[in-house]
Amino acid sequence: MKNRIAEVVRKTKETDIKVKLNIDGSGKAKIDTGIGLLDHMLELFAFHGLFDLEISAKGDLKVDIHHTNEDIGIVLGDAFKKALGDKEGIKRFGSASVPMEDVVGSIAVDISGRGYYKFLYTGQSAFAAKTSDGYLFLDAEHFFESFAKHLGMNLTLTVNLLSQDLHTNLEPIFKALGIALDQATQIDPRRKGIPSTKGVID
């Protein structure tokens, strides 16, 4: 199997982002986005997905974190799409549920070529909870949506938001995303060709 690696650079007037990815890695991460909580979450994502991942990002954080956060999702999605190539032999689907205290994050993914993101939650909302650098659950949603659309992945996230601590809500989600995406990107030795009856995944 050829190395499934990618390097993507994106520069705009608002951000300068570089991502290096090895899908078939060992979970090593070097993340520097300027957003502390996002750094930690992406390290968890890489570790549990067994992806080798390097991200360096500079953005207009003096304004707010919105552009940097969203653009990291864009570039990470582009990197996965590039590394997967024509997606020949991949399992395509993956799912995982991870608990942390009274929060359970559940993820289902389909690398279908059609980018779509859906978030469902039950229980008490913790949208107002934020970190010292102003990170909100809504920012995580912007990241997930950008990531899903640029990878070409159908991503459904379900979580019971029982904790008022944002870290506790997001950690099981990012861990589950890593596990589910690892499943979906694995090569199935039984699969001959591209895993679609159409014969192509864009």
Image (spheres, rainbow, N blue to C red):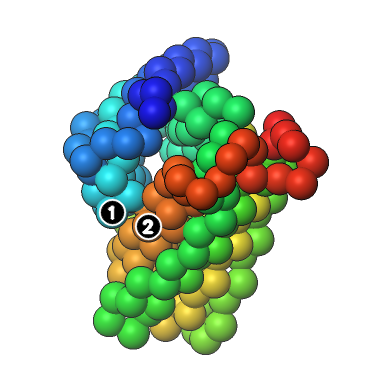
Residue at image position (65%, 61%) is 118
Q: Secondary structure at mark 2?
A: helix
Q: Give x and y (percent) for residue 64.
A: 46, 37
Label 1: few (<14), some or many (≥20) within 10 Å? many
Looking at the image, can residue 32 be seen?
Answer: yes
Q: Amino acid at mark 1?
A: His
User: Height in image: 118 above or below 21?
Assistant: below
Q: Give x and y (percent) for residue 13.
A: 54, 14
Q: Quadrant of the C terminus?
A: top right
Residue at image position (27%, 81%) is 101
Numbered label attached to residue 147: none
The numbered mark, 1 or 2, whose residue comes first in the sequence reads 1
Q: Nearer the viewer, residue 127 or 109?
A: 109
Q: Secondary structure at mark 1?
A: helix
Alpha carbon separation for disc pair 1 and 2: 6 Å
Q: Which residue is mark 1?
A: 48
The reply to whether the C-beta atoms of the residues labelled 1 and 2 are less than 8 Å apart is: yes
Residue at image position (46%, 77%) is 161
Q: Nearer the viewer, residue 75 or 186?
A: 186
Q: Which residue is mark 2?
A: 179
Q: Give x and y (percent) for residue 80.
A: 48, 33
- 153 with respect to 182 (left or right): right
Q: Quadrant of the N terminus?
A: top left
Residue at image position (35%, 66%) is 172
User: Height in image: 127 above or below 103?
Assistant: above
Looking at the image, can residue 78 be seen?
Answer: no
Q: Nearer the viewer, residue 126 or 151?
A: 151
